């Protein structure tokens, strides 16, 4: 996070460049907001690297937290199943609200929960509940964005 904050440069030229890049992406049929909203759109390449690391960390934390919450909630909280359904429905909002979520990066944020939960579930299924423990040792042990999509790859690296 410190890296991210130290590298912020509110240069107006950067904003113009980002808008041009966004328009070019749109011409190619790709929505430039898909990668995290306005923050990612305005990020420099250096920022994107840091943003990627922070997103990987948050994906793991949010996915793990959601998985634990759902598991414990199912046993200890009446109404947890309904609450989980409502939260899931919010992740898939469309229309104007969905566009606004995409614009501010909330859609990408909500997607992190799904990716993180799937990652943790795959790790547990392949190697047991404690197999996620190395992730908490330090930054170099965290899964990368690619490893979040390929849990066995992370397991092999931290073995």
Image (cartoon, rainbow, N blue to C red):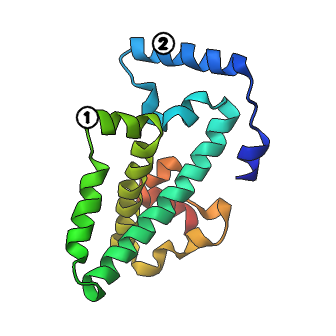
Residue 82 in the image, given as x and y percentages of width and height: 20, 70
Q: Quadrant of residue 40?
A: top right
Give the Cα separation between the discs numbered 1 and 2: 24 Å
29 or 92, which lies in front?
92
Badge count: 2
Q: Which element carries disc 2, helix, strand or loop? A: helix
Point out the tag, 1 or 2, that comes first from the N-terminus.
Answer: 2
Q: What's the mark number on residue 107? A: none
Are there few (<14), some (14-19), or many (20+) residues within 10 Å of tag 1?
A: few
Tell me if residue 41 comes above or below residue 135 in the rendering.
above
Q: Left or right of 40: which side holds 87?
A: left
Q: Residue at x 29, y 88 (%)?
A: 76
Q: Which residue is mark 2?
A: 24
Tell me if residue 90 comes above or below residue 47 in the rendering.
below
Residue 146 in sight here: yes
Q: Residue at x 64, y 40 (%)?
A: 49
20 or 86, which lies in front?
86
Q: Which element carries disc 1, helix, strand or loop? A: helix
Q: Which residue is mark 1?
A: 95
Foreground mark, 1 or 2, reads 1
Image quadrant where one finds the C terminus: bottom right
Are there few (<14), some (14-19), or many (20+) residues within 10 Å of tag 2?
A: some
11 or 64, which lies in front?
11
Residue 148 in the image, given as x and y percentages of width and height: 45, 54
Residue 48 in the image, given as x and y percentages of width and height: 62, 37
Tell me if residue 128 comes above or below residue 119 in the rendering.
below
Q: Residue at x 39, y 57 (%)?
A: 113
């Amino acid at each position: 996070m410190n890296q991210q904050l130290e590298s912020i440069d509110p240069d107006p030229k950067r904003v113009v460049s980002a808008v041009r890049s966004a328009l070019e992406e749109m011409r190619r049929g790709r929505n430039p907001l898909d990668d995290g909203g306005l923050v990612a759109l305005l990020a420099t390449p250096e920022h994107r690297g840091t943003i990627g690391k922070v997103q990987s960390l948050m994906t793991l934390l949010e996915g793990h937290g959601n998985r634990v919450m759902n598991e414990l909630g199912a046993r200890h909280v009446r109404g947890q199943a309904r609450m989980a359904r409502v939260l899931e429905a919010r992740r898939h909002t469309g229309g104007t609200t969905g566009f606004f979520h995409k614009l501010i990066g909330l859609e990408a944020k909500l997607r992190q929960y799904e990716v993180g939960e799937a990652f943790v579930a795959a790790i547990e299924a392949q190697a047991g509940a404690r197999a996620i423990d190395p992730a908490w040792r330090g930054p170099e042990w965290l899964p990368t964005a690619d490893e979040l999509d390929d849990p066995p790859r992370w397991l092999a690296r931290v073995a």
